Amino acid sequence: MARPLRFRHAPGRWTDGRVRSEVFDPLDDNLGATSRQPWFKPPEGYAARRFDVDNGDTALFCWSDDGAYWLGNTETPSSLWRTEKYGFDEVPNPVADWAERELLAELHDQSPWLEPYPHLSWFFLPVFLSKDGRWTTREFFEEHAAGFPDADRGAVLDFYEAFLSTGVFDDERETMAGKLGTSERLDLTRMAATMGEFHAAKLLVDAGYEAVPEIEVTTGHSIDFQARTDDESEQPLVEVTRPLPPNRRSAGTPSAAVRDTAQTKTDGQLAAHAGGVVLFVDCSSFPDDDWFAVKDGQPDVGHRPAVVYRMRPDGSVTGYTKGTVPLELDTLR
């Protein structure tokens, strides 16, 4: 599985002739491509070209006296193979801003339904225009409502746009957006599980916590979140799991689906950590009847403390807890 979009930095002196001979000509020879002026003005002090590949791929290249930057969802020319890769927040801001303008315009031209959602478009841009996952990631939101059952796509996109536009994960965009994956195969289970982490973060943020992702612990694992407040003595760790509804797994009942999925997590990562982690069980993939059965029965999940809940695109969340949960979750009903 390819990674999300990243820049390559090629130091040294670049000229129009070198760009043509070492970047464009190999791309054109192998795949067929057209070299064009970029759609938007390049960064101050840089020259730039846009390469439109015959198979629908795109590459951007800009250069100055101090080196060049390549960003593309296509085959990388051999002249750039040994160059270092950098995220959008690791290159000069003018370069990142220009590249994002170019790619966002392309994204909205190809998928105009995303244009009303500027922050969602920007946040997931590294996967929405990745080499292998640019169609599957968009299909997940457009055709499958990002894993919400019986939900209107517009309501779902509004939900994520409102949450992401708070800037909650702007500084961790590469990490969090990359979890959606860049596979040519649409994997609804994995993608929905990824969105479960965003739901957990929203539950924490709405309760007044800062949700800090990917906390490394002494066992060598990473726990999904730490819920931080100004009180440094209270910094609970949170691990998230998202069970499939019964109609998409072998478990025969909603309660069994919850128990089985939680058991996988508790027998593995949480067992190695030896306690001290709150397990969040996100049942947002469950349709109404299945969720009502879980909420009414309140099955144990094999780990305490635990929070079992379902979130809907209107932001409402219902659920229950097991054990003494060291979090004040006032929005949980």
Image (tube, rainbow, N blue to C red):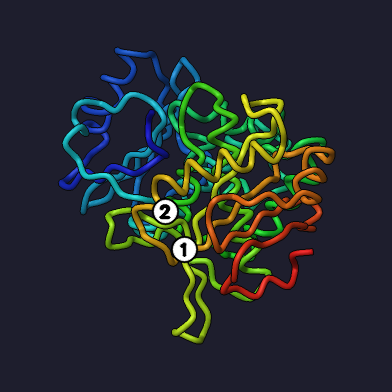
Q: Amino acid at mark 1?
A: Val
Residue at the spot x=61%, y=67% of the render?
Answer: 204
Relative horizontal placement of residue 165, taking residue 42 as reference (left or right)? right
Earlier-in-chain disc, 1 versus 2: 2
Q: Amino acid at mark 2?
A: Leu
Read off the residue under disc 1: 277
Judge by depth and name the residue closer to the eye, 71 or 260: 260
Which quadrant of the figure contains the C terminus? bottom right
> Residue, x 31% and y 20% (percent of image)?
27
- Judged left or right of residue 146, residue 133 is left
Q: Quadrant of the N terminus?
A: top left
Residue 256: which quarter of the image? top right
Instruction: Measure the alpha-carbon separation of dots 1 and 2.
Output: 7 Å
Question: Element type at marker 1?
Answer: strand
Look at the picture and state if 167 lies above or below 327: above
Would you identify the image quadrant in which residue 329 lies? Answer: bottom right
Q: Secondary structure at mark 2?
A: helix
Counting from the top left corner in percent of width and height, residue 51 is at 41, 28
